[in-house]
Amino acid sequence: MKTAIALLPVLAVALFTGCTPRIEVAAPDTPITINMNVKIEHEIHIKVDKDVETLLKSRSDLF
């Protein structure tokens, strides 16, 4: 009986160590890819003087 009582703590420690969680942090095997399909459109409105507007209309070869 004394040996059974002496083995009880050993058995309890063995049972509890079998239930310890294992956490592992590892890098992935493949590289991380990020797809960014972005379409950017801008509209720019410029307000000009009448003289400049007539000049641009008459001389279309400037731009």
Image: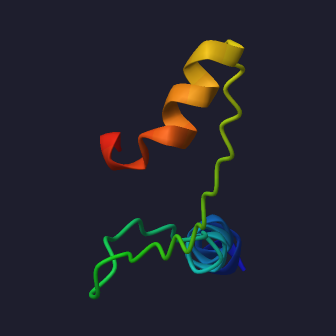
Q: Could you tell me residue 37's position as x and y percent?
A: 55, 75
Depth order, front residue of 42/49: 49
Placement of 56 over or under 10, stated as above or below: above
Give how far across and how far down residue 12 sits, in percent. Answer: 68, 71
Q: Residue at x 35, y 44 (%)?
A: 63
User: What residue lies at 51% left-to-right and 27% top-to-bottom?
Assistant: 55
Colour scheme of the picture: rainbow
Q: Position of residue 44 (x, y in %)?
A: 65, 37
17 up-or-down from 41: above or below: below
13 shown above or below 30: above
The answer to whether 17 appears left or right of 63 in the picture is right
User: Closest to the observer: 49 or 54?
Assistant: 54
Along the line of sight, which residue is nearer the eye, 10 or 33? 33
Q: What's the residue at 51%, 67% (across, down)? A: 23
Residue at the extreme front: 58
* Left or right of residue 45, residue 36 in this image: left
Residue displayed at 65% across by 79% down: 15
In-front residue for pair 48/23: 48
**Image quarter of the N terminus:** bottom right
- x then y, percent, for residue 52: 56, 19
Q: How many marks?
A: 0
